[in-house]
Amino acid sequence: MRNTLYLPKFKPVRFTCVLVATFLGLALFFAPANAQSAVGAGGLPSLAGLVEKLSPSVVNISTETRVEASSGSQFPGFPGDMWNEFFRRFHEGPFGPGPRGRSQPQPRQRSQGSGFIVSEKGLVLTNNHVVEKASRITVRFKDQEKRNAKVVGRDPQTDIALLQIETKPGDAFTALKLGDSEKLRVGDWVMAIGNPFGLSHTVTAGIVSAKGRVIGSGRYDDFIQTDASINPGNSGGPLFDLNGNVVGINTAIFSRGGGNIGIGFAIPVNMAKKLIPQLRTGVVTRGFLGVSIQPVNESLAKELGLKDTHGALVSNVIENAPAEKAGVKRGDVIVSVNEKKIKNPRQLSMTAADLKPGSIAEVGIIRDGEKREVKLKVAKLPGSKEEMAKAAKPALQKDLGIKGQKLTPEIRKQVGAKAEKGVVITNVLPDSPAAAAGLRRGDVIVEANRKAITDTEQLREALKKGKNKGNLLLVERQGTTFYVALEGKG
């Protein structure tokens, strides 16, 4: 989850100048299953007993990061620098002011976050962004005892990290129980314990506002949204259900000024449970199929002869990857993996990631309206740069609202295309079918109606054969390929 925190245009909250006393005038009361009778008796139950039991296993995390500063640059953490992002990280804090007029060749950035114990041996789960650049990590318990800690494993893709607390003879850590986030329902009560704005072991409560939220932080977005107050410093802390089970890791907020406005996000604990065994080894591996995918909208479904918009449309097949070796082709729609139905590209990405490299996966596809099954040997997910797909794009006619020319080496270099053949769009007319489909100048048309395109003449011929007065184009934009359903006949 990497990009997790508050909105860009506003200044960060500084501990040195802000006194936080934001307890919303909403008294949120909870009624666990074993206390339903108390509700009926005329008194809502207290969370005090739960808090007393769980708080000792929640820790505050302080980090120090060495930062190189040049004479003409701003320190990280100040406006005009990294603050122009959509979501901000909860743990970030300002630099402590140094003596006036004295240079500091190696300044240190001090930050704060939260975490919780998941093993009797002192393993702590938190967010990756809390500790990823830390040169020193200190955890503090509720009784104010401090211990040093080190990173055991990190996973930037999901923003989860595992720490090991420095142990002493006779230590007996109490681990929290990890629940089942799949069983959470929208409207269920939840409770958060953390370190917001440096206020140790703050307890807040609310409900699950939504599940499966995608906030643009990464390919594995699947957040729990909650209105329990979550603020800077809560990052990495636990989100509990009313039985005291951890159901999420508090990670991000949507905010206009750096504080809580009732929209917070937590990583589902089931995601963390899958990763903990790998994090213990220090290395996280994921399955890789080798396809670029996109959603199936109604227009594409019509052109592809599909009954609905379920599945993930293959817009590119990476050379020598498992999918290509198994016979998967561009234009196929993946609808299942190992008999698990695939509803959209995000679900396919998460399902593929859970596959064990080297295992055999049975993939269900729809090609030309027919369902097929292919078996492929799952590979290990390479680095993000290695995964970038190769693609190309085509050009159109007057009635469709586009003008184009043959892709040449010179034009290919200018538009940054990876495709070696195709038609580059030189103009898109306003209020035309091409404009409505989102085509832009510089796009490269690689295929039209399932036929490869090398020049404008081939494009014209392919567009004349558009069925149902529509056309299916494969387009490349800045190295990424995708399909476009274009209304009208060329």
Image: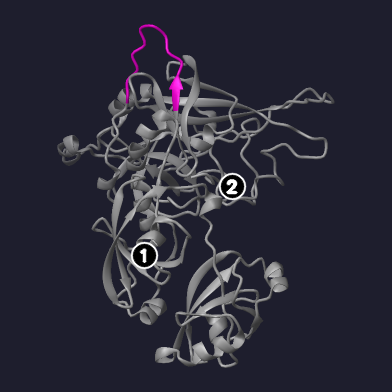
Figure coloring: one colour
**Label 2 crowding class (10 Å Cα cut-off): few <14, some 14-19, many 20+?**
some
Secondary structure category for the residue under label 1? loop
Vertical relation: 321 (above or below) 405: above
Vertical relation: 456 (above or below) 90: below
Q: Which mark is residue 257?
A: 2
Q: Is residue 121 left or right of residue 194?
A: left
Residue at 17% over, 35% down: 34
Please provide percent x and percent y for residue 355.
Answer: 33, 47
* Residue 412 in which image quadrant: bottom right
Residue at 43% over, 69% down: 330
Residue at the right extreme of this rendering = 101
Residue 444 visible, this angle: yes
Type of the residue with mark 2: Gly
Please provide percent x and percent y for residue 186.
Answer: 30, 52
Q: Is residue 412 left or right of residue 310?
A: right
Q: Which residue is mark 1?
A: 327
Q: Nearer the viewer, mark 2 or mark 1?
A: 1
Q: Main secondary structure of the magenta part?
A: loop
Secondary structure category for the residue under label 2? loop
CA–CA distance between discs 2 and 1?
51 Å
* Residue 121 in which image quadrant: top left
- Comes first in the chain, label 2 or label 1: 2
Please provide percent x and percent y for residue 395.
Answer: 59, 82
Residue at the top extreme of this rendering = 169
Vertical relation: 269 (above or below) 337: above
Q: Is residue 367 left or right of residue 71?
A: left
Q: Is residue 342 magenta?
A: no
Closest to the observer: 208 or 277?
277
In the image, the segment drawn in magenta is 163-175
